[in-house]
C-alpha cells in the first residue's frame, strides 16, 4: 500500500480559481460564446439572452487569504454587451502567510462593444494581505464602465485595520494606448492613514468608478452634483471620467453609488446587487 501523503498543517491548502467568459452579438441580443471554469471560481448567468448579457462570478472558497490565486478573463466581441458582477461581497481575511492573496482580472471589449465591470464590495479584514490587478483593453469605439469598492474593516464590530496590506492597480488601454493607470497601496496601520485630512478623512469605505465613453465629458457636471462630500470626479483625458467616492461605511457608500452607476450605464444595477 502507498504511504499516506503528508500534510503540512503549518501551511493549509490554498484556493486556486480561474474563469473565462466570451460573448458575441447574435441579432439584437448578446449570447455566450465560450465559458471556462476551474477550481473555486464559478460563473453564473441569472438572466436570459438580451441586448446585454449578465454574468456573475462566485468564489466558492468563501473569501481570500494569504497564498490564494484567482484569475478571471472576459471578452466582449464586436457589438456585444456584457455586464459582470459578483454574487456577494468578497472578503479578504487576515492571514499570517507572507504571500498575499492575488487576484487578476483581464477584460477586453472589441469594436462597438459595451462592457460593464460592476463587482460588489471587497471587505478588508484585520491582518489581510491582498494584491489585485485589473486590465481592460478597449477598441476605439468600445464603451466601458468599471468599478471597485473597498470597505475598510467591519465597523459594526469595532474592527480597525492596524495590520493590513493592499496593493490595487488599474490599467485601461484604448486601441493599445494607455488611457488610465491608477495604483493604491496601503500597509501597516491603515486606519491611521485613512484618518488623515489629506487622505480619506476617516472614511470607512471607498469606491473608484471609471467611465470610458464618448459622453464622458457631458456627464461630469451631473455626476459631481450626485457626489457626497468629500468625493470627487474629474476628466483626466478626453472620453474618460474618473470618480472617487468616500463614505463613512459600506451602506452609505452604496446609497450614493447605485444611482451614480445607473446614471452612467443607463441601466439598473445588476440583479445580485438587489438581493
Image: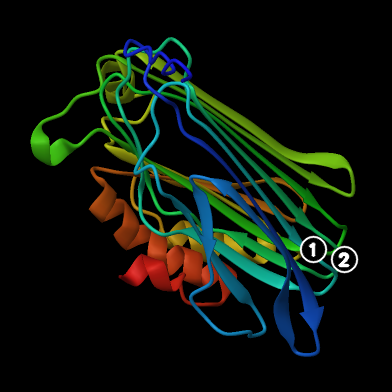
Image x and y of residue 197, in percent: 32, 24
Image x and y of residue 259, in percent: 41, 69
Which residue is more in the foreground, 30 or 59? 59
Where the C terminus falls, by quadrant? bottom left
Which residue is more in the foreground, 5 or 231? 5
The image shows residue 122, relative to residue 251, as above or below, that is above
Which residue is more in the foreground, 38 or 72? 38
Mark 2 and mark 1 in contact (Cβ < 8 Å)? yes
Image x and y of residue 110, in percent: 84, 62
The reply, left or right, for residue 41 in relation to residue 193 is right
Query: How far is mark 1 from mark 2, CA to CA?
Result: 6 Å
Query: Pointer 2: residues within 10 angstroms few (<14), some, or many (20+)?
Result: some
The answer to whether residue 150 of the structure is visible from this angle is yes
Secondary structure under tag 1 reads: loop
- Give the numbered dot on residue 111: 2
The reply, left or right, for residue 262 in relation to residue 104 is left
For label 1, the residue is 142
Query: Pointer 1: residues within 10 angstroms few (<14), some, or many (20+)?
Result: many
The image shows residue 31, relative to residue 76, as above or below, that is below
The image shows residue 169, relative to residue 241, as above or below, that is above
The residue that appears at 38% across and 16% down in the rendered structure is: 7
Q: Earlier in the sequence, mark 1 or mark 2?
A: 2
Amino acid at each position: 500500500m502507498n504511504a499516506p501523503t503528508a500534510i503540512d498543517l503549518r501551511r493549509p491548502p490554498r484556493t486556486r480559481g480561474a474563469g473565462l467568459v466570451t460573448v458575441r452579438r447574435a441579432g439584437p441580443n448578446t449570447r455566450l460564446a465560450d465559458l471556462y471554469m476551474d477550481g473555486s471560481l464559478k460563473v453564473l448567468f441569472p438572466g436570459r439572452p438580451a441586448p446585454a448579457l449578465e454574468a456573475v462570478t462566485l468564489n466558492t472558497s468563501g473569501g481570500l487569504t494569504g497564498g490564494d490565486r484567482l484569475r478571471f478573463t472576459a471578452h466582449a466581441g464586436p457589438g456585444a454587451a456584457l455586464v459582470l458582477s459578483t454574487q456577494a461581497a468578497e472578503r479578504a481575511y487576515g492571514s499570517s502567510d507572507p504571500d498575499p492573496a492575488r487576484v487578476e482580472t483581464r477584460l477586453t471589449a472589441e469594436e462597438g462593444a459595451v462592457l460593464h465591470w460592476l463587482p460588489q464590495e471587497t471587505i478588508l479584514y484585520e491582518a489581510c494581505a491582498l494584491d489585485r490587478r485589473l486590465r481592460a483593453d478597449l477598441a476605439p469605439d468600445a464603451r466601458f464602465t468599471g468599478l471597485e469598492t473597498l470597505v475598510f474593516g467591519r465597523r459594526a464590530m469595532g474592527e480597525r485595520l492596524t495590520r493590513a496590506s493592499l496593493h490595487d492597480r488599474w490599467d485601461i488601454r484604448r486601441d493599445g494606448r494607455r488611457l488610465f493607470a491608477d495604483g493604491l497601496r496601503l500597509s501597516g496601520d491603515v486606519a491611521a492613514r485613512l484618518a488623515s485630512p489629506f487622505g480619506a478623512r476617516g472614511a470607512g469605505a471607498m469606491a473608484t468608478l471609471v467611465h470610458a465613453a464618448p459622453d464622458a465629458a457631458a456627464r461630469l457636471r451631473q455626476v459631481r452634483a450626485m457626489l457626497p462630500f468629500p468625493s470627487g470626479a474629474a476628466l483626466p483625458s478626453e472620453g474618460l471620467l474618473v470618480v472617487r467616492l468616500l463614505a463613512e461605511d459600506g451602506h452609505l457608500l452604496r446609497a450614493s453609488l447605485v444611482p451614480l452607476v445607473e446614471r452612467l450605464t443607463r441601466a439598473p444595477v445588476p440583479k445580485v446587487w438587489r438581493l
